Image: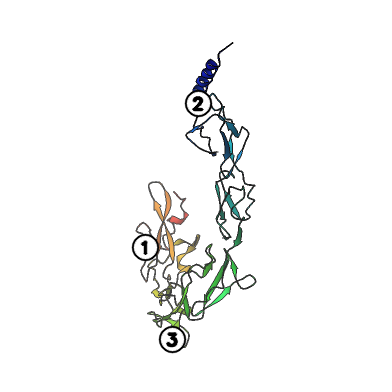
């Protein structure tokens, strides 16, 4: 029989041994917390792991009791982020995201020509819901365009309410006697405003001057304005150098200044030449001379090769240079062959 004193002493030693085996501070788990959290625990004390707000348990033990061994059991608890539902399709826009997990954010943007009605972003909350509703991409519109001074709208097709959609165009024209500076067409931009308006200014031109050896006709009024016209003509034996009709331009100048150029008298009396792609007799076609600007081609001989070639001559304000290679034959020298009758080189 064991003495009572020995039994009491053994129990005391065991109590002392076990009392020294406390559990340490529990391991930290991602996105989880421990209650109560202390640096050490006595055997028999209980701790509870819970997932932080926005995270949910994906299996594993949550409650642990500090054993007599002083060693916590292996913890397999995993806390995963909540997943928000599909955000939806943004018509005429784009939803940008990486994941739908807490606490990620998605952003919204609209296509060109549309603007965002609502929030431009939303966050997945700890409850697993989006912080904002899906916005709407509304079409961009422009108010009725302002009308520049001395102008009127020639093309404009607004929507109901007189507004216009992005990309719509309006075309202006200036009132008579006024010239437009800038683009006549404006466009409704993605920002809901119109591109730069043109400007209409009154434009006057001086009276056109009469050309030497010619005449000019223009409207019989005290002032000549933008788009007014004048017509020119020349006296006999003179040709108009420039357009017959000119117009008062937007910078207050006439579109051209025609002049009258003298015709050319030909020293050659007899020759076959090329005029406008055809062979003609110079004595018949140009018996009254050549007008300014007219061009003919003379035939010349290459005696070595016994062939012919052509050189051009043009009437310029009463002057024409006959090619030196051309040889005019007398009407009596019937035995000589004209250059125009010789085979071309």
Badge 3 element: loop
Residue 223 got which mark? 3
Q: Is residue 215 above or below residue 277?
A: below
The residue that mark 2 highlights is 19
The residue that mark 1 highlights is 322
Q: Is residue 7 above or below residue 226?
A: above
Task: Between residue 85 and residue 127, name the one nearer to us.
Answer: 127
**Local crowd size for mark 1, using a 10 Å CA cut-off: few (<14), some (14–19), many (≥20):** some
Q: Quadrant of the rendered structure where residue 310 is?
A: bottom left
N-terminal of the pair, mark 1 or mark 3, is: 3
N-terminal of the pair, mark 2 or mark 3, is: 2
N-terminal of the pair, mark 2 or mark 1, is: 2
Label 2 – label 1 distance at C-alpha: 135 Å
Residue 25: x, y in percent? Answer: 49, 32
Residue 257: x, y in percent? Answer: 40, 75
Q: Is residue 305 above or below residue 140?
A: above
């Amino acid at each position: 029989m064991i003495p009572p004193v020995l039994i009491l002493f053994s129990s005391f030693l065991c109590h002392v041994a076990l009392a020294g085996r406390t559990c340490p501070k529990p391991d930290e788990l991602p996105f989880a917390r421990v209650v109560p959290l202390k640096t050490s625990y006595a055997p028999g004390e209980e701790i509870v792991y819970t997932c932080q707000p926005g995270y949910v348990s994906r299996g594993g033990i949550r409650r642990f009791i500090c054993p007599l061994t002083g060693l916590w059991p292996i913890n397999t608890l995993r806390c995963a982020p909540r997943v928000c539902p599909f955000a939806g399709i943004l018509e005429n826009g784009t939803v940008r995201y990486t994941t739908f997990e807490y606490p990620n954010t998605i952003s919204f943007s609209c296509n060109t020509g549309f603007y965002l009605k609502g929030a431009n972003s939303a966050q997945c909350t700890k409850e697993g819901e989006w912080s904002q509703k899906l916005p709407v991409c509304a079409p961009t519109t422009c108010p009725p365009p302002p009308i520049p001074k001395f102008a009127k709208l020639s093309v404009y097709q607004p929507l109901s309410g007189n507004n216009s959609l992005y990309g719509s165009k309006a075309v202006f024209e200036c009132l008579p006697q006024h010239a437009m500076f800038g683009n006549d067409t404006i466009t409704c931009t993605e920002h809901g405003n119109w591109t730069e308006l043109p400007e209409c200014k009154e434009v006057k031109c001086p009276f056109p001057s009469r050309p030497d050896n010619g005449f000019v006709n223009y409207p019989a009024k005290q002032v000549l304005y933008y788009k007014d016209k004048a017509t020119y003509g020349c006296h006999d034996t003179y040709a108009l150098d420039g357009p017959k009709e000119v117009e008062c331009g937007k910078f207050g100048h006439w579109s051209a200044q025609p002049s009258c150029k003298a015709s050319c008298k030909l020293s050659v009396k007899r020759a076959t030449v090329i005029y406008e792609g055809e062979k003609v007799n110079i004595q018949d076609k140009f018996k009254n001379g050549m007008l300014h600007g007219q061009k003919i081609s003379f035939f010349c001989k290459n005696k070595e090769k016994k062939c012919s070639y052509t050189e051009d001559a043009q009437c310029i304000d009463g002057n024409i240079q006959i090619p030196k290679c051309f040889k005019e034959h007398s009407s009596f020298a019937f035995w000589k062959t004209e250059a125009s009758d010789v085979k071309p080189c």
